[in-house]
Amino acid sequence: MTTRQQPCPSGRYWRVKRGETLYYIAQSTATTVNQLLKLNPNIDINNLRIGSLICLPPEQPCPSGIFWEITAGDTLFAIAKSSNTTVEKLLELNPNINPNNLFIGQNICLPG
């Protein structure tokens, strides 16, 4: 019996690479593990298959279109200070980020 992949409402997919976890994919795509599990109910989180496609939620819009790419040592406080805003505003614009676990290469939305 062959299993067909369910259509992905957002049309956005992630192709699993060696060593990736659902947590890593969630962090990389600014979503949560729970959201990924809702969109991919048949996924085995303990056995992600290399090359398989995972449905992603729609991208969160960034009203300003201005992003900050996280580099080593960045904190939300430092980003807020450099961007002349507040940590609270950054969290409002980026509801799916974990302020205690920013990772290099992650993009966060800045206010305009």
Image: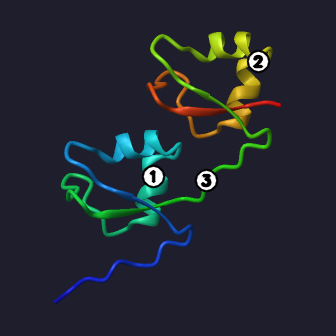
Mark nearest the camera among 1 and 3 is: 3
Element class at badge 3: loop
Query: Callout 2: few (<14), some (14-19), or many (20+) C-alpha neighbours within 10 Å?
Result: some
- Cβ–Cβ below 8 Å for labels 1 and 2? no
| Residue placed under numbered mark 2 in the picture | 86
Horizontal side, residue 52 vs residue 78: left or right: left
What residue is shown at x 49% (from left), y 55% (from top)?
35
Earlier-in-chain disc, 1 versus 2 = 1
What residue is shown at x 53% (from left), y 23% (from top)?
70
Query: Callout 1: few (<14), some (14-19), or many (20+) C-alpha neighbours within 10 Å?
Result: few
In whole angstroms, how far apart are the C-alphas of marks 1 and 3? 16 Å
Per the rendering, the mark at residue 34 is 1
Element class at badge 2: loop
* Corner quadrant of residue 49: bottom left
Depicted 36 relative to depicted 31: above or below: below
Query: Callout 3: few (<14), some (14-19), or many (20+) C-alpha neighbours within 10 Å?
Result: few
What residue is shown at x 47% (from left), y 30% (from top)?
105
Q: How many marks?
A: 3
Mark nearest the camera among 1 and 2 is: 2
Mark nearest the camera among 2 and 3 is: 3
Q: Position of residue 82 (x, y in %)?
A: 71, 11
- Cβ–Cβ below 8 Å for labels 1 and 3? no
In whole angstroms, how far apart are the C-alphas of marks 1 and 2? 28 Å
Per the rendering, the mark at residue 59 is 3
Pick the residue in front: 78 or 41. 78
Depicted 42 relative to depicted 103: above or below: below
- Type of amino acid at the residue the image marks with label 3: Glu
